[in-house]
């Protein structure tokens, strides 16, 4: 028992080189068969069907032939045997006086032994039995018989060749008919059946898959009228359902992605708004402090200017003092505006004519020496009124005009104009300020009204002028926008609700 176990253990541990030859043959044969199956599986469907129905019809043809040929051959052999028996029996009883006419169709002839080449054995056979018949062998087609009372002999030819030729002809006819049936059947399958019921549905499905890969949604769904009711049709229906579900999920994901993008943008906007609000809160506290500190020296300066006006008789000096008094009053208004900004207190509003506001704003801006080298044009029509606070609107236009003045070069041009329009279905007035300077950099244009955004690199640019202007315009229920002119320069537009009725 231990020897047997040890022997089995040693056989189980044989390396591949020492394995039995039968095992190696089986493995190689299995690998070869897998290779043939794989190669056949890699063929396209059309070639698979061609191979299969060719093999089928070849086997069918061979089966029919191998069934009919032995049957026909057996029947011909039986007929040949019966006819040979009848011929031999008639030949045996034939005499010169009776029976020759019946055997003329079998090439009945008479002749001497030398004419027929009969051997001595045949002559000895006939000497012993003159009435017998003789054949060289069973396969010989010639049969001989002696003529009584003479040295001559009869010879007939059995129809062996006829039956052999008949069998060959039958085999040729069967093969020809089977070949014609085979060719017609293959042509019918390849031209009618398979293209209409196999190749076309597969082609339709492949075209739909190609459309899916190309992203052509209009062509990726197989039309209902092209779907058959067989297994291929079930695959098409399942594929259509899968594609529709996949596209629906893609659309849902796309909508979700858009919603997420919008929410991210809203979050970023809120974040920037919070940062701006924090800055504005700090700015409000700072502005309140600055306004508080400015009020006392402004009051002293304003009183001093008033006393100088009372004591000075020089007209030129009085003109300059009046201008200085107007500036101190403007500074006082700015200080009050800073306090309003810090307190978020809505100022009083009423009908305000726009053209004088533009004139006064330019006079305040014209204190800068650069204004003498710039040409300013006020195109605002007289009598046009808006509903608002004059002091705050002057501050808006001062900021706009100052930005334009800082942007243009010497001998530059600045103009202000107006045109009527509607805002939220209500009458409004658009007041624009434009210049022929270099324009606003495109990267800053979307954020031009944000706090601390400035293109000026000197110490005077704080980036707060347009932010304050936007805040004032929003308090007036209007809008403000900036753009670059097609001919060069910048254009800022302020839209403010118009005064519906002129003051009495």
Image: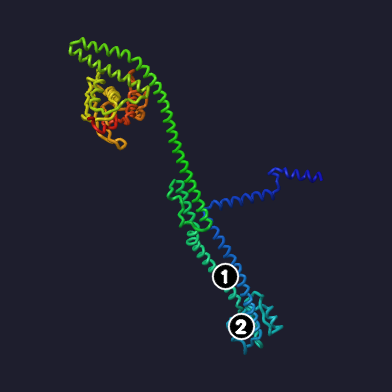
Of 472 and 191, the residue lying toward us:
472
Q: How is the image coloured?
A: rainbow
Q: Position of residue 194 (x, y in %)?
A: 50, 59
**Helix, strand or loop at mark 2:** strand
**Helix, strand or loop at mark 1:** helix
Q: Residues within 10 Å of mark 2 (few under 14, many from 20)?
A: some
Q: Position of residue 282 (x, y in %)?
A: 40, 21
Residue 407 appears in the figure: no
- Quadrant of residue 158 in the image? bottom right
Viewer-side label of 2, 1? 1
Q: Position of residue 418 (x, y in %)?
A: 24, 31
Instruction: Report, in whole angstroms, how far the alpha carbon at label 2 lies from the one at label 1.
Output: 38 Å
Q: Quadrant of the C terminus?
A: top left
Comes first in the chain, label 2 or label 1: 2
Left or right of 503? Residue 91 is right
Tag shown at residue 185: none
Q: Residue at horizontal 29%, vertical 36%?
A: 426
Q: Residue at horizontal 27%, vertical 30%?
A: 386
The residue that disc 1 covers is: 171
Q: Position of residue 9 (x, y in %)?
A: 75, 43
The residue that disc 2 covers is: 111
């Amino acid at each position: 028992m231990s020897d047997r176990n040890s022997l089995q253990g040693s056989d189980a541990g044989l390396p591949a080189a020492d394995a039995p030859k039968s095992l190696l043959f089986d493995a190689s044969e299995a690998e070869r068969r897998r290779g043939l199956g794989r190669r056949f599986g890699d063929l396209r469907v059309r070639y698979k069907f061609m191979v299969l129905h060719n093999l089928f019809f070849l086997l069918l043809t061979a089966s029919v032939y191998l069934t009919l040929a032995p049957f026909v051959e057996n029947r011909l052999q039986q007929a040949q045997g019966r006819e040979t028996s009848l011929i031999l029996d008639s030949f045996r009883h034939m005499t010169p006086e009776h029976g020759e006419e019946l055997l003329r169709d079998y090439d009945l002839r008479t002749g001497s032994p030398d004419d027929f080449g009969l051997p001595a054995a045949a002559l000895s056979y006939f000497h012993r039995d003159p009435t017998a018949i003789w054949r060289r062998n069973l396969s010989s087609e010639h049969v001989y018989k002696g003529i009584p009372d003479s040295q001559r002999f009869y010879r007939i030819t059995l129809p062996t060749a006829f039956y052999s030729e008949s069998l060959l002809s039958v085999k040729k006819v069967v093969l020809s008919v089977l070949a014609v049936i085979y060719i017609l059947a293959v042509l019918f399958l390849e031209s009618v059946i398979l293209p209409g019921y196999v190749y076309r549905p597969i082609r339709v499905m492949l075209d739909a898959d190609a459309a899916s890969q190309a992203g052509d949604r209009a062509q990726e769904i197989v039309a209902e009228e092209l779907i058959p009711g067989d297994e291929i049709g079930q695959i098409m229906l399942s594929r259509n359902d899968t594609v529709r579900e996949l596209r629906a999920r893609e659309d849902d994901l796309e909508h979700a992605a858009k919603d997420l993008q919008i929410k991210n943008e809203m979050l970023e906007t809120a974040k920037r708004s919070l940062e701006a609000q924090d800055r504005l809160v700090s700015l409000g506290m700072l502005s309140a402090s600055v306004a508080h500190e400015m009020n006392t020296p402004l009051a002293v300066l304003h009183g001093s200017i008033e006393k100088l006006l009372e004591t000075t008789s020089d007209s030129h000096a009085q003109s300059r003092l009046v201008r200085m008094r107007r500036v101190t009053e403007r500074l006082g208004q700015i200080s009050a505006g800073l306090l309003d900004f810090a307190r978020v207190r809505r100022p009083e509003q009423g009908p305000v004519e726009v053209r004088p506001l533009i004139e006064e704003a330019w006079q305040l801006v014209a204190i800068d020496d650069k204004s003498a080298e710039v040409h300013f044009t006020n195109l605002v029509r007289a009598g046009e009124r808006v509903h608002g606070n004059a002091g705050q609107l002057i501050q808006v236009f001062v900021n706009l005009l100052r930005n334009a003045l800082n942007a243009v070069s010497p001998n530059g041009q600045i103009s202000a104009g107006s045109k009527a329009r509607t805002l939220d279905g209500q009458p409004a007035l658009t007041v624009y300020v434009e210049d022929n300077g270099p324009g606003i950099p495109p990267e800053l244009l979307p954020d031009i009204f944000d706090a601390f955004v400035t293109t000026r690199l000197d110490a005077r640019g704080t980036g707060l002028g347009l932010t304050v202007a936007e805040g004032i315009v929003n308090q007036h229920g209007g809008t403000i926008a900036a753009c670059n002119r097609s001919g060069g320069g910048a254009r800022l537009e302020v839209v403010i609700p118009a005064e519906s009725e002129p003051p009495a």
